[in-house]
Amino acid sequence: MSDKNPFGIAITPGKLRSKPKDSSPGTVARSDEAAEKHGFVDRAPKKRRGRKPSPRTGQVHAKVMPEIARDIAAEARFRGVQQGVVIEEAWALYKAKHDV
């Protein structure tokens, strides 16, 4: 402590030293075994929870006029597919027509 500030902490490089932690497989195994004996268990999830990732990662949220949105929704409902499938097929037709 410094004499000027009784609540201050003197941090000098000579007094604070970090010690390397032993992370060898044997040490880790022993500490895990001791932790299990005392009731500590690994709470990390074993596998990824939730929905599976979609193969369609490029999401497009197109803002269209209300009547076009109703038409797309009706066509998708009629065919029993998602609205994105209708948009994908419309884009494929556009590309075929314009040689894109």
Image (cartoon, helix red, strand yellow):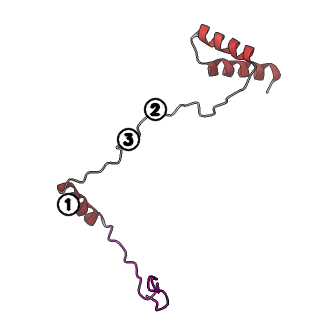
Mark 1–mark 3 distance (CA, rounded to whole Å) = 25 Å
Apparent side of residue 19 relative to residue 29 in the rendered image (left or right): right
Find the residue positioned furthest to the top.
Answer: 78
What kind of residue is marked 1?
Ala
Q: Residue 34: which disc? A: 1
**Residue holding disc 3:** 47
Q: Is the magenta stretch mostly helix, strand or loop?
A: loop
Mark 2–mark 1 distance (CA, rounded to whole Å) = 35 Å
Mark 3–mark 2 distance (CA, rounded to whole Å) = 12 Å
What kind of residue is marked 3?
Lys
Pointers 2 and 1 in contact (C-beta within 8 Å): no
Magenta residue check for 74? no
Instruction: Tell me which label, 2 or 1, sits earlier in the chain.
Output: 1
Is residue 11 depicted above or below 75 in this figure?
below
**Residue holding disc 2:** 51
Instruction: Report how many numbered discs are placed on residues in the image.
Output: 3
> Residue 1, located in which quarter of the rendered image?
bottom left
Quadrant, the C terminus: top right
Provide the residue span drawn in magenta: 2-23
Name the element at disc 3.
loop
Name the element at disc 1.
helix
Residue sitting nearer the eye, 44 or 56: 44
Q: Residue 18: which disc? A: none
Residue 33, given in percent of the width and then of the height, sits at 21, 58
User: Residue at (70%, 17%) from the top-left corner?
Assistant: 69
Residue 90, given in percent of the width and then of the height, sits at 72, 18
